[in-house]
Every structure is written in C-alpha cells, then in structure tokens.
Amino acid sequence: MAKREDKIGERISEAEHAVMEALWDDSPLTAADVCERVCEQRGWSMPTVKTLLSRLVTKGAVETEADGRRFLYTPTIARADYVGHESRRLVDRLFGGRPASLFAQLAESEALTDQDLAEIERLLKELRS
C-alpha cells in the first residue's frame, strides 16, 4: 500500500487548490460545475479551469471518469490528508520540524487571539488524556 505522501504527489498551487476546494466540497463535478463555483470570484474562464483540472489529473490529485461527452472529476486525496501533509511541510521547512516553534512564532507576532489560545489549550488537554 502506498504511503499517504505518495498519494499527494506534487505540490498543488494556490490556483489548483481553489479547484480542489470545489471538488472537496462536492464531487464528482464536471469542468462546468467547477467553473460555476470558482470562475466568477477568481476572474477565471472555462479554459483556465480545464487547464487546472488537467494539471491536477497529471499530478494524481484528481481522477476523471467519462460521462458521455463530458468528464467527471473526483479528488484522489482527502482534504484532511492534504492539509496534514502541507502543514508538516511548512513546519519542516520553516521551523526545523518543530511544531512548538510555529506556535512560538505565532504568539510572538501576536497572530494568536485569546480564543485561539483557549482552543490550543483544549486540544492539548485532549491529546494528553
């Protein structure tokens, strides 16, 4: 069985991520369905969406299924797996693999609210029990 990182494959760009979000929210979708969800807010056209879908298929993040004259697109990786992988990459790249350093940086830059801190404390308590 392949490791989870193997399924994630190549890095997904910000634009590709917008397409993935549409597919994670509801799939399978046609290219037109994806465009309905992202084109207006991003200022994209149908050819842009088709290009991004093609790249995601090449990267192994999305699979296609023929449905008559159109294709249905479905993500091959779960959102949670992708977020976990990218979070780990961020911590490894910027903080030497130490998650505590990420939290320290956020705290020092005052990016954490009291609500954020309370949530982190709750999560830590859950992990310890």
Image (cartoon, grey):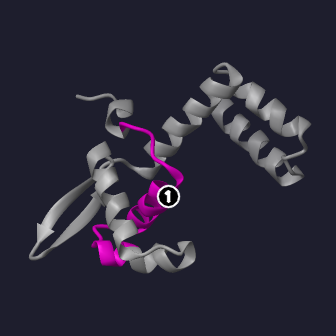
Residue 102 seen anywhere in this rendered image of the structure: yes
**Number of marks drawn:** 1
Q: Quadrant of residue 125?
A: top right
Taking 118 as reference, is 51 left or right?
Answer: left
Q: Amino acid at mark 1?
A: Ala
The magenta span reads 9-34
Point 9% across, 76% down: residue: 68
In the picture, measured across the screen, residue 106 lies left or right of residue 37, that is: right
Task: Give coordinates of residue 74: x percent, y percent.
Answer: 28, 60
Q: Residues within 10 Å of mark 1 (few under 14, many from 20)?
A: few
**In the rendered image, the vertical position of residue 56 relative to residue 3, given as above or below:** below
Q: Main secondary structure of the magenta part?
A: helix
The quadrant holding residue 64 is: bottom left
Q: Residue at x 27, y 73 (%)?
A: 30
Looking at the image, residue 115 sits to the left or right of residue 87; the answer is right
**Which quarter shows the C terminus?**
top right
| Quadrant including the N terminus | top left
Please give the residue where the numbered disc 1 appears in the rendered image.
Answer: 15
The secondary element bearing badge 1 is classed as helix
Whether residue 129 is visible to the viewer of this picture, yes or no, is: no
